[in-house]
Amino acid sequence: RLTGGLAVLALAVAASAAGSWASAHFGHAFAFRYQADVRLVLYDGLERGAPRELQGRRTGDLAAVAMGDVDQLELLFAHLAPGDLDAAVAGAGALLALGLIDVRFALVAAVGMALVATLPVVLARRTARSGERLRGELGGLNADVVDGIQGLRELLVFRGVGAWQDRLADR
């Protein structure tokens, strides 16, 4: 009676392992190529919008988007998405295997999986505001760093390096 369920579970584990291998093999290459493409499109948009769209924006804010935010794509494509796909394949295989053994087992597991899957969504909604605030503060910090580097000569001449470092530390 367990043979069908075990066979389905074994296939799900094999598919999960193949997906993990493919993710490790191709995920980073895809993510880095995609990052490069996004940066080129972003630069093209900035170039077409300059100076009208860039007026009032600090260089550090733009650098934070072009570098930091785009870097998050690598995390998504090379680390998070493959893990989610792996969990979905293994979970579906486990539910199918449990359903072949006893539908009640599959129903109990499905309810548990649904609860576990909704938890990150609920937590993400709660932390979205603090993430936006943090991203804004990071943009300001990046802007201060870029401004300081661009004005390093003046900071040295007027002995303002210490004040600039204090400002960065306060941020």
Image: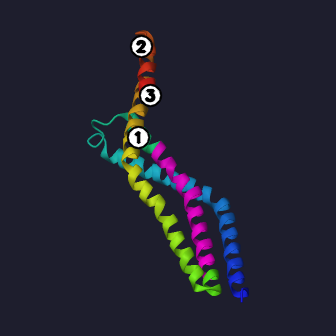
Provide residue 100's location: percent of width, then percent of height. 63, 87
Provide the secondary structure element on which disc 3 rests. helix
Residues shaded magenta = 68-96
Q: Looking at the rendering, in which quadrant would you find the C terminus?
A: top left
Whole-Å distance between the Cαs marked 1 and 2? Answer: 27 Å
Provide the secondary structure element on which disc 1 rests. helix
Tell me which amino acid carries mark 3. Val
Instruction: Judge by depth and name the residue closer to the eye, 160 or 157.
Output: 160
In magenta stretch: residue 79: yes
Tell me which amino acid carries mark 1. Leu
Residue drawn at x 72%, y 85% as measured from the top left: 2
Quadrant position of residue 8 = bottom right
Which residue position holds label 2? 160
On the picture, is 76 further left or further right than 126? right
Which residue position holds label 3? 145
Residue drawn at x 36%, y 45% as measured from the top left: 46
